[in-house]
């Protein structure tokens, strides 16, 4: 792949919480349109890694680049830094295990809030665009409902639509289906699959191995703060090279 196409680049990322070293030197390039699925045991650092990408956590050491710009540039003044990070976070959408919708806003308002407040989009235009997105994720009929009246799967699809409303260049997903009832999982995964097919650059932490097998361009296996191995789904699932990977796949299989 062409190096100009690199969207997200992690170089030697370390993260400590006090004495605890949670990330031990992560190198990872994610290319435009690539879908990277991150797997690994609980506590291996997957969430921390995702949170470092958009600086919800600051790495202790190493470099994060987004579209070739240094994200964790310590030389910026406080104001410049906040401005840059706010801009960058609109370009890198994030969806969490818990949906974090605003409970006092309707579905439509949840989606139009950031475009109107942060991007100065005209409210009418923002609403029209929000309805388009709700249609795409299959919950347009819920546009005037409050989040408390949605199922978990519907909430998560709204959360995805909300992130997409900012027209991101990349999306990060941290176990988006782990908190859902089993019958809700498929709908959310199919929205994500559609997004992947549309060419979105994605990093997805998930235990849904069939989704990984079908949708991932690359599977990255992490353990104890390191990338242990990576490859195509066929390589990692079909012919894992490391004992840790083999053990993990056997445990979840
Ligand atoms: P994963 O998402 O793979 O389950 P995490 O990134 O959530 O792993 O956590 C990796 C390790 O970092 C765990 O040992 C966890 O307890 C620790 N950790 C995560 N966040 C914090 C924090 N804010 N303070 C201290 N330790 C943390
Ligand atoms: Mg996690």
Image: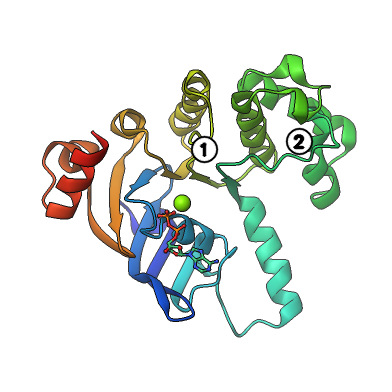
Does any portion of residue 51 appear in the rendered image? yes
For residue 162, side relative to residue 146 (left or right): left
Q: Given this view, does label 2 or label 1 mark the residue nearer the observer?
A: 1
Residue 111: mark in rendering: 2
Residue 27: mark in rendering: none
Would you call the spot at circle 2 few (<14 residues within 10 Å), some (14-19), or many (20 or more)?
many
Above-or-below relation of 138 to 14: above
Quadrant location of the C terminus in the rendered image: top left
Which callout, 2 or 1, points at the residue further toward the start of the chain?
2
Residue 176: mark in rendering: 1
Residue occupying the point 49% across, 80% down: 18
Image coordinates for residue 102, horizontal then vertical, percent: 78, 40
Image coordinates for residue 127, horizontal then vertical, percent: 82, 29
For residue 61, side relative to residue 90 (left or right): left
**SS for dot 1:** loop
| Circle 2/circle 1 CB separation < 8 Å | no
Q: Looking at the image, how many numbered discs can be counted on the residues?
A: 2
The residue furthest right is 123
Q: Quadrant of residue 218?
A: top left
Above-or-below relation of 74 to 242: below
Residue occupying the point 62% across, 27% down: 152
Image coordinates for residue 147, horizontal then vertical, percent: 76, 30
- Work out how far the residue at label 2 is from the one at label 1, CA to CA, in angstroms: 18 Å
For residue 143, side relative to residue 93 (left or right): right
**SS for dot 2:** helix
Residue occupying the point 33% across, 47% down: 39
Above-or-below relation of 47 to 167: below
In the image shown, does 241 or 192 lie closer to the viewer? 241
In the image shown, does 189 or 90 lie closer to the viewer? 189
Image coordinates for residue 192, horizontal then vertical, percent: 49, 31
């Amino acid at each position: 792949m062409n190096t100009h196409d690199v969207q997200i680049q992690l170089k030697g990322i370390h993260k400590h919480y006090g004495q605890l070293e949670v990330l031990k030197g992560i190198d990872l390039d994610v290319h435009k349109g690539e879908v990277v699925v991150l797997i690994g045991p609980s506590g291996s650092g997957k969430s921390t890694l995702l949170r470092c990408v958009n600086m919800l956590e600051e790495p202790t050491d190493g470099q994060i680049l987004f579209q070739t710009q240094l994200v964790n540039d310590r030389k910026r003044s406080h104001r410049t830094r906040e401005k840059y990070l706010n801009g960058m976070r609109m370009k890198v959408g994030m969806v969490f295990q818990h949906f974090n919708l605003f409970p006092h806003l309707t579905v439509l308002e949840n989606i139009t809030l950031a475009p109107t407040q942060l991007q100065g989009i005209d409210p009418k235009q923002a609403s029209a665009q929000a309805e388009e997105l709700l249609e795409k994720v299959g919950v347009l009929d819920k546009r005037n409902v409050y989040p408390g009246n949605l199922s978990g799967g519907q909430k998560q699809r709204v959360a995805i639509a909300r992130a997409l409303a900012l027209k991101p260049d990349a999306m990060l997903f941290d176990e988006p289906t782990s908190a859902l009832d089993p019958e809700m999982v498929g709908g959310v995964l199919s929205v994500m699959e559609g997004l992947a097919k549309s060419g979105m650059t994605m990093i997805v932490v998930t235990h849904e191995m069939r989704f990984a097998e079908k949708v991932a361009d690359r599977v990255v296996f992490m353990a104890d703060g390191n990338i242990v191995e990576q490859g195509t789904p066929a390589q990692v699932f079909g012919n894992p090279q490391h004992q840790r990977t083999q053990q993990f796949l056997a445990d979840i299989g």
